Amino acid sequence: MSFLRSRYINVAIIFTSAFLMIFTYFFKVQVLSDAATLVQKTVSLFAAFTLVLGAMNLTLIAYRQVQKKAPTAPFSVLAIVVMLMMIITGLIPPLMNSPQFNWMYNNIQAPTDSTMYAMMVFFVASACFRAFRARSKEALVMLVIGSFIIFTYAPIGAIIWPGLPVIGSWIEKYPMTGASRGFSIGVALGGLGIGLRIMLGREKAITGE
Amino acid sequence: MAEAILIPGKTVSLIVFLVIMVSIYLTMRNASKGKVPTIRTLPAYNAITEAVGRAVELGKPAHYTTGTHSFVGQTAGGSAALTAGLSLLAYISDICLSKGATLIASCPYPEVMTIESEILRSSYLKAGMEEEYSEVEHLRYVPIVSSCAPFAAGVAGWLEREKPATNFLLGPFFFESLIIAEAGYHAGCFQVAGTTSAGYSAFFVACCDYVLIGEELYAAAALATNDPIQAGSLRGSDVNRAWIIALILIGVVVTLLGMKPALMSLLSI
């Protein structure tokens, strides 16, 4: 079966899939569009299978924690219990939409997600405190520009001086947009280079080599 | 025989796409024939060895994550950054094994986890230490569900508890970049980060010791693989950048001459 593990097979599959996606982006050919949709669905199906591997990894790590009697063992057990509860309630008909599943999603998962997102404000404050120290010329420029942007959005900015939000908006509209577009063009060109290397089989990381 | 019809409004983008791809291909071919362009040194890339050395000195593990992006159903830009992150994982894993440091990777998507597992396994195989590789010991699956929050919480908690010597964050990131980088900072990690998103690069600049900004991530991946083809494709990107800048300048002149509507109708072909 070493033939199936050959990198030429991998490259052929990658090239054909990528060519289908690119071609159907620019051209309308029903047969190829159908084939591209099939490829996308197949990829999603394979990805779903790998979930089993992920669940196994999670369970084994939790098992090791319990075996070692680590201080975090109770949390590991809780993680596995919650994972199993989500799987079981998700399998109750109608699949992924049973009242039990929705209750767990709305009352456990969604609030914890929102909590993490809300905690961002403290992380931002802590990071800003360190970043906004004028240790070099570049940091001083960042400090000055950052201050203008803060005073653009903070209501007190316009009270201190009505010109502050005007300058802040100008910075956002012109220098920031220009820099951001330049950044995006550079990243997109680099991305195309990687895409071509993947298609030609010259990118080893993608096949785990 | 099915007829191929060019979708209206995509003629110009097709021409631009073909010009870019052909020029990148030509520079890659030139590089493979020996005309390898030189890549300037990147401080963040040079800091990788220092970061691994720190892990060896302190006798603590190094942590690596490629961020919260998958190859399935997400943007092409993120996939490119993820590919660069995976190349750097292979490079950093090799350095860790040669210096005697332990590398532990966290991954939010199982399909990416399988690729990372293969990369780490190959690295151990190259070092002649295949028996020492264990997926459970060296790779942590921290699932991502409807948002990046579970992954961010899982990794930040682990950093806080285990306090690794070094934290590598190289790949595509969203808001979890700040949570993980801040947790790493408070855990006392030496942090090397890089992403292709302008907004999230700012978080890394605020929290990390060394940062690869934007396409520097691709350049670092090219340096890591030491592959002439990769260096050639970077040269191709630079060539394309030159004519894109020329096009932008032409656009500015045409707009100043009051011919913007004519230009827009030409571009919408």
Image (cartoon, coloured by chain):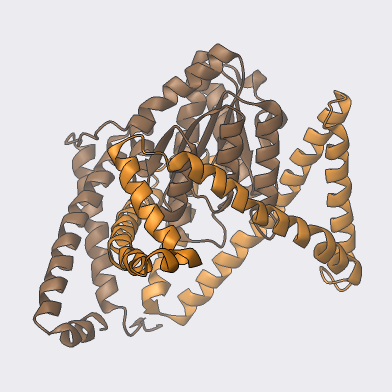
In the picture, measured across the screen, residue B45 lies left or right of residue B149, that is: left
| Relative to A18, A123 lies left or right | right
The residue at the point 10 percent across, 73 percent down is: B253
What quarter of the picture does the N terminus of chain A occupy? top right
- Residue A104 or A22: which is nearer the viewer? A104
Colour given to chain A in the rendered image: orange
Q: Position of residue A38 (x, y in %)?
A: 57, 69
Residue at the far front: name it.
Answer: A160
A12, A138: nearer the viewer: A138
Look at the image and tell me whether residue A197 can be seen. yes
- Residue B197 x, y percent position in the rendering: 43, 53
Task: Determine whether A161 is above or below A136 in the image.
Answer: below
What's the colour of chain B in the image? brown
Q: Is residue B251 above or below residue B115?
A: below
Q: Position of residue B115 (x, y in %)?
A: 57, 41
| Quarter of the view holding residue B121 | top right
Asked if one can make out residue A206 in the rendered structure from this viewpoint, the answer is: no
| Residue positioned 69% across, 45% down in the render | B153
Q: Residue at x 41, y 63 (%)?
A: A160
Residue B14 shown left or right of residue B179 in the figure: left
Residue extending farthest top: B57
Choose between B18 and B150: the one closer to the eye: B150
B87 and A18: which one is in front?
B87
**Residue at horizontal 24 percent and vertical 70 percent from the top:** B15
